[in-house]
Amino acid sequence: MATIKHLSSKNSNYAAAESYLTFQHNEYTGLPILDEKGRPKLRDSYLLDTLECGESSFAMACLIANRKYGKNGGREDVKTHHYIVSFDPKDAVENGLTMERAQALGLQFCKENFPGHPAIVCTHPDGHNSAGNIHVH
């Protein structure tokens, strides 16, 4: 069984969302984990897709949409909504859940619930507290 968590953010740095999804972060501090040369370390495994971004990056697609619709210009405006769908580690064995299937479910969720909005969908297996559960952002 999956659980869904929602977070909203007023951070106007849309590239930070992609960075969080693709690089390893300390689960307690939220800070990026750095390699021996001081560079952020990529996650060991992840799948990433965007929706409604065209040829642009997710960050640029958000800025273009904001300008087009006159939205998210103020400091107090919520800039992004972050949904996390966490699957039980047993789902891999008991229900045949794979990262690819979870990614497809995440893409379907976005298409059905946020049509026409730029979205980034990322699946990775490194859950909180090293649980190894598959989850989709």
Image (spheres, rainbow, N blue to C red):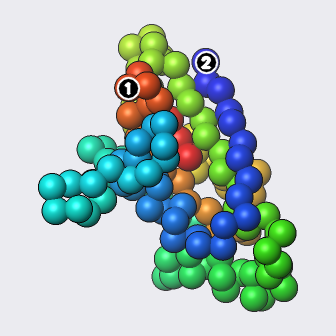
Q: Residues within 10 Å of mark 1 (few under 14, many from 20)?
A: few
Q: Say whether residue 39 is left or right of residue 133.
A: left
Q: Which residue is mark 1?
A: 130
Q: Is residue 64 visible?
A: yes
Q: Nearer the viewer, residue 78 or 136?
A: 78
Q: Is residue 115 visible?
A: no
Q: Which of the numbered marks, if any, corresponds to residue 1?
A: 2
Instruction: Indicate the position of residue 86 as horizontal and vertical percent values.
Output: 56, 30
Q: Say whether residue 25 is left or right of residue 9.
A: left
Q: Nearer the viewer, residue 71 or 115?
A: 71
Q: Residue at x 27, y 54 (%)?
A: 34
Residue 37: quadrant of the picture: bottom left
Q: Nearer the viewer, residue 84 or 38?
A: 38
Q: Quadrant of the N terminus?
A: top right
Q: Earlier in the sequence, mark 1 or mark 2?
A: 2
| Residue sitting at the far left | 36
Instruction: Indicate the position of residue 63 as horizontal and vertical percent values.
Output: 66, 82
Q: Nearer the viewer, residue 123 or 130?
A: 130
- What amino acid is found at the position of numbered circle 1 in the picture? Ser
Q: Secondary structure at mark 2?
A: loop
